[in-house]
Amino acid sequence: MTRSSVTFGSAGIEIAAHLYTLGGRTGGPQPAVVVGHPGTGVKEQAAGLYARQLADRGFITLAFDAAYQGESGGAPRGLEDPSQRVEDFKAAVSYLNTLEDVDDDRIGLLGICASGGYSLSAAGGDHRVKAVSTVSGVDVARQFRLGADGTQDPAVFRRLLDAAARARTAAARGEDPGALPIFPGTAEEADALRGAHAVEGFEYYCTARGRHERSAATFAWRSVDKLASSDAFHAVALIGPRPLLQIVGTRAGTAWMAIDVHQRATGPKELHWIEAASHVDLYDKQEYVDPAVDKLTEFFGRNLR
């Protein structure tokens, strides 16, 4: 397996990606899987881990940085733009369509965390995608509005919208609008302010476990009002009759969103549980990643024939 750095365009923005190929393999065009990273993540973290392991199992894979994030272009930096995130997935499929080694009729999507929701939306509107899967998949807009576990006080998001409105006004006046911090300063602050999910995120993104220099620590304030009106699950019903696989940890506080998607899906669908795994455990803990990759290999092997 070899990894190459590549770029492709997405609505006028240059997207940076890693292409994992089957070095020396022959036998004609091969199946391929596009892998999207979690919110605030980059292609070198969870997305790269899954892309590498799926490549080892025989798939061409493409892990990319979302627009405005990582090594990809776009300004302001740290913007979480749902429509652009969906476009990035479609642009990644278009890039794979240009490669002789890729079979255009055997392309799938894998979205991790926030990319899970975006991959569902992209697949619903793009019939070039033959199968779609998620790992710890969420709609990040729902997560902002309702909280990771769905129990957040509505006042929390109203305060974020107030701050986003002030930031837009500041920018219009030529002032620095600042940015929204994603992580508290310590695990203790995360526990006090936002609960177990925030602690998990801090332990992955802000410690040696998963920290990466290009992983976003803040979101541009414009992200908040864009997320206010976004619904990554709106096109789930359009995915059928193509197959859908969702992989979720039994301890994931975000699992309610995968259950919602499962109930909306109209085609072949499976909600596959990884025993004892939390949401973030599935990013990098090999005892949980290995069975997830086994399931993904079986799913894509069967549906990207």
Image (tube, grey):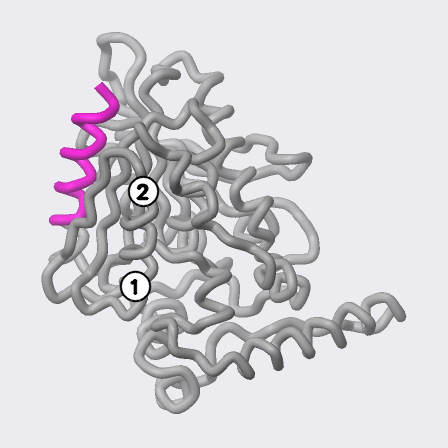
Mark 1 sits on what residue? 256
Instruction: State left or right for residue 3 relative to residue 145.
Output: left
Q: Quadrant of residue 108?
A: top left
Q: Are marks 1 and 2 in contact (CB under 8 Å)?
A: no
Q: Marks 1/2: CA distance?
A: 14 Å
Q: Residue at x 62, y 81 (%)?
A: 159
Image quarter (top left, top right, bottom left or bottom right) of the N terminus: top left
The image shows residue 135, relative to residue 40, as above or below, that is: above
Q: Quadrant of residue 15?
A: top right
Q: Amino acid at mark 1?
A: Trp
Please give the name of the residue rendered at 18% of the width and 32% of the height, measured from the top-left corner: 57
- Across and down, in percent, residue 284 comes to 25, 58
Tag 2 or tag 1, which sits nearer the N-term?
A: 1
| Residue depicted at x 34% and y 63% | 210
Residue 261 spot, x, y in % from top left: 33, 50
Q: Which dot marks residue 86? A: none
Q: Does the magenta run of residues contain 68?
A: no
Q: In x, y percent, where is residue 103?
A: 34, 15
Q: Which residues are magenta?
A: 291-305
Comparing labels 1 and 2, the label whose residue is closer to the camera: 2
Out of 221 and 261, give the one closest to the viewer.
Answer: 261
Nearest the viewer among 286 and 36 is: 36
Q: Position of residue 52 (x, y in %)?
A: 27, 40
Q: Quadrant of the C terminus?
A: top left
Q: Which residue is mark 2?
A: 265
Q: Is residue 294 magenta?
A: yes
Specify the principal SS of the magenta part. helix
Label 1 crowd (10 A; few <14 / some 14-19 / many >=20): some
